[in-house]
Image: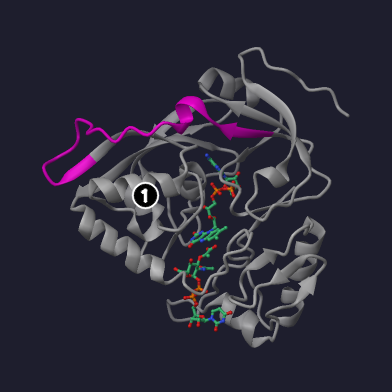
């Protein structure tokens, strides 16, 4: 076993199986740095690293990773929804919300407080930073729509920027890999708990057909239909007759063909084999939505 590097600044450094942090439940070991403030983060970024969010879009290799894996905690997991000076009568510009805050819990708070702007992201089991990095969302809205300011850390600097400085696309933010979204300020409208709740419940209805088992969400992005819309990758995989296909303990969900699920004891190799099968059998080229580590 490799010796742990240890931390000068008080970051927690542990060798852990990443299967513990991924929603599919696969992944070998890595040196995990749990950081609570900027000094600890700067130390963690001093060697090759990857940043882990909610692990809800990741397939980590069974052999694990040689890079450090950084997890945001402490001041990066705090939610301050109090109004900032830019707020107006109709619009709330919040204080800082940490990149390590779980998105589902944040949405519950917005629902209770009647704050509108992120309803379309309901049901995305991400952390705020990961959801911003991917511009996660649904046809009812994306993370981008609720952002006012981003704070991004790299080994060289920590800077703040407006989301309008970046292009935002479908499951894409243009934030370079390993630029860490440490905190954001949100731009929300004052509404009522009933109205916000109704919008969330409506967006959530689209998830009725999604499997309830361990999964990293949709495997492939929906390809363009050639006229500005999207075709469901799930529908294409379904039409290729692949629902229920199994490799080891991983299966293409019989409920929704764009979801690979863990039947219990699946490995990353099982998931890779299913991704290959899909690529081989579906006639058109599909772009992977999952991140494969490494
Ligand atoms: P991770 O999976 O941990 O990491 C994904 C990528 O984000 C990695 O490159 C990682 O390095 C990077 N990252 C993580 N945190 C940060 C950070 N703080 N700063 C910079 N980069 C970071 N997605 C949708 O868009 N819409 C959906 O409707 C949807 N439904 C899902 C349903 C289920 C049941 C599941 C399991 C997943 C679903 N997903 C959906 C996929 C997933 O939730 C999103 O891709 C999400 O954005 C991943 O965020 P995460 O925090 O889990 O990131
Ligand atoms: N369909 C099939 N067979 C299947 C799956 C879907 O025929 O196996 C059909 C459905 O019947 C429906 C159409 O395809 O007519 C669209 O399906 P769905 O409404 O489930 O939407 P999707 O395009 O497959 C997208 C996102 C999901 C998001 C849902 C709900 C992508 C890749 N997927 O799925 O996002 O939750 O809409 O808003 O954009 C994710 O990105 O990880 C993800 C889960």
Magenta span has 33?
no
Of 20 and 141, the residue lying toward us:
20
Q: Badge 1 is on which residue? A: 107
Q: Nearer the viewer, residue 283 or 14?
A: 14
Residue at figure coordinates x 57%, y 69% from the top left: 211
Q: Farthest top residue? A: 8
Vertical placement of 79 versus 275: above or below? above
Quarter holding the N terminus is: top right
* x and y percentages locating residue 17 in the rendered image: 75, 40
Identify the residue at the far right of this view: 1
Magenta extent: 69-92
Residue 42 in picture, x, y percent from top left:
58, 22
Question: Which quadrant of the structure image shows residue 16?
Answer: top right
Circle 1 Cα neighbour tier, 10 Å, few/some/many (<14 / 14–19 / ≥20): many
Residue 9: % across, % down: 61, 14
Residue 43's place in the image compared with 216, above or below, is: above
Q: Is residue 83 visible?
A: yes
Residue at image coords 55%, 74%: 223
* Label 1 element class: helix
The residue under the point 33% across, 32% down is 80
């Amino acid at each position: 076993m490799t010796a742990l590097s240890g931390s000068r600044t008080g970051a927690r450094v542990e060798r852990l199986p990443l299967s513990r942090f991924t929603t599919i439940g696969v992944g070998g070991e890595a040196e995990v740095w749990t950081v609570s403030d900027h000094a600890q983060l700067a130390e963690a970024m001093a060697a090759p690293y990857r940043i882990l969010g909610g692990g809800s879009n990741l397939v980590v290799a069974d052999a694990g990773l040689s890079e450090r894996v950084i997890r945001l905690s402490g001041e990066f997991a705090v939610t301050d929804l109090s109004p900032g000076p830019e707020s107006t009568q109709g619009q709330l510009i919040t204080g800082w919300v940490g990149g390590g805050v779980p998105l589902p819990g944040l949405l519950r708070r917005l629902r209770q407080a009647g704050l509108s702007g992120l309803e379309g992201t309901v049901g995305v089991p991400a952390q705020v930073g990961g959801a911003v990095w991917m511009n996660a969302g649904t046809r009812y809205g994306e993370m981008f729509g609720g952002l006012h300011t981003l704070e991004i850390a790299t080994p060289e600097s920590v800077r703040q920027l407006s989301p309008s400085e970046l292009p935002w696309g479908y499951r894409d933010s243009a934030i370079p890999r390993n630029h860490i979204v440490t905190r954001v300020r949100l731009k929300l409208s004052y509404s009522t708990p009933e109205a916000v709740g109704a919008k969330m419940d409506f967006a959530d209805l689209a998830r009725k057909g999604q499997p309830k088992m361990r999964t990293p969400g949709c495997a492939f992005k929906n390809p363009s239909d050639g006229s500005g819309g999207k075709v469901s990758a799930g529908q294409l995989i379904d039409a290729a007759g692949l629902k229920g296909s199994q490799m080891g303990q991983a299966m293409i969900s019989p409920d929704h063909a764009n979801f690979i699920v863990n039947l219990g004891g699946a490995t990353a190799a099982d998931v890779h084999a299913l991704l290959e099968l899909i690529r081989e059998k579906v006639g058109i080229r599909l772009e992977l939505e999952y991140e494969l580590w490494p």
